[in-house]
Image: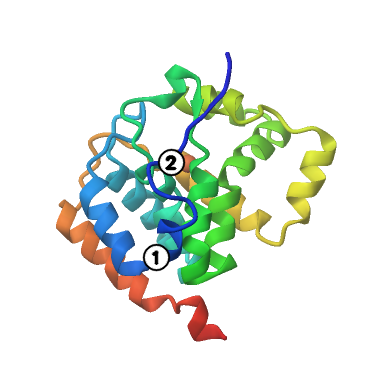
Amino acid sequence: MTTLRHKPVIDETEHLEMMNAEKLLELIRQKGSMEYAGEGVSQLQHAWQCGVLAEHAGVSRSLQLASWLHDIGHMLTDLPGTPTLLGIDDRHEMLGARVLHPIWGDAVSEPVRLHVQAKRYMVTTLPGYLAKLSQDSVRSLALQGGMMNSQECDAFNANPFADDAVRLRAWDDAAKQHGVPGLYDEAVLSALRALIVSVPASHENA
Ligand SMILES: [Fe+2]
Ligand SMILES: [Fe+2]
């Protein structure tokens, strides 16, 4: 299958620089009801399930926020339905990291940027992991490069956020539960807002 690169709807040089936490929340409010491609849950429910799993694991608030926002890049594209069925890789992890880095820095943006590479790494190094992936994750895996070679594994491991990305990936894979009693959308957005205000913006760390 030929991999198509999708051009994001937003202007990559202008709009990304203008993003802040409030605009991200508004984007999620507008696009959170989008289907999480081929998984039977909405983007907002997927984000919430992933964030709750991170919270229950007791990790840092930065990694909890990365878990909530790991697929924000999907909401920055205008791709309906299931893009992988069309052979499209939307490169959402790169787009998401570009939006998140100016606001919160590496602790949030790097696990997001690496969450696709983490899947490739885990498929390569963890026996049985591939069999647990959803159909859409298997389709996207092929578009994203498939298994890693040893050099790619070494490069992934050398990133200081590799462990965070692997943990996020495991929650991501588990955060596709149908029919899970959840919060209504406004309550989910309120929970996300509360987390966002608790994570210092990168300029506050300077
Ligand atoms: Fe993703
Ligand atoms: Fe995801």
- Compare residues 5 and 105 and report the one nearer the observer: 5
Please, what is the three-letter code of the amino acid marked with disc 2?
Pro
- Residue tagged 2: 8
Image-based side of 192 in relation to 125, left or right = left
Number of dots carrying numbers: 2
Whether residue 57 is visible, yes or no, is no
Q: Is residue 181 left or right of residue 118?
A: left
Question: Which residue appears farthest toward the right when viewing the image?
Answer: 151
Quadrant into which the C terminus falls = bottom right
**Horizontal placement of 155 versus 16: left or right?**
right
Q: Tell me: residue 172, above or below residue 36.
A: below
Q: Are marks 2 and 1 in contact (CB under 8 Å)?
A: no
Looking at the figure, which quarter contains the N terminus?
Answer: top right
Residue in view at x 65 percent, y 35 percent: 120
Residue 18 numbered tag: 1
Q: Relative to 182, is 77 above or below?
A: above
Question: Percent position (x, y) of residue 166?
Answer: 61, 49
123 left or right of 199 in image: right
Judge the density around disc 2: few (<14), some (14-19), many (≥20) Cα neighbours within 10 Å: some
Earlier sequence position, callout 2 versus callout 1:
2
Which amino acid is tagged 1? Answer: Met
Element on which disc 2 rests: loop
Residue 55 position by quadrant: bottom left
- Which secondary structure lies at badge 1? helix
Residue at screen point 65% across, 59% down: 161
- Asked whether mark 2 and ligand 1 are closer than 8 Å, the reply comes as no
| Gap in angstroms between the C-alphas marked 2 and 1 | 15 Å
Mark 1 is surrounded, within 10 Å at the Cα level, by few (under 14), some (14 to 19) or many (20 or more) other residues, namely few
Mark 1 Cβ and ligand 1 under 8 Å apart: no
Residue 70 x/y as whole percent: 46, 51
Identity of the residue drawn at 55% across and 48% down? 94
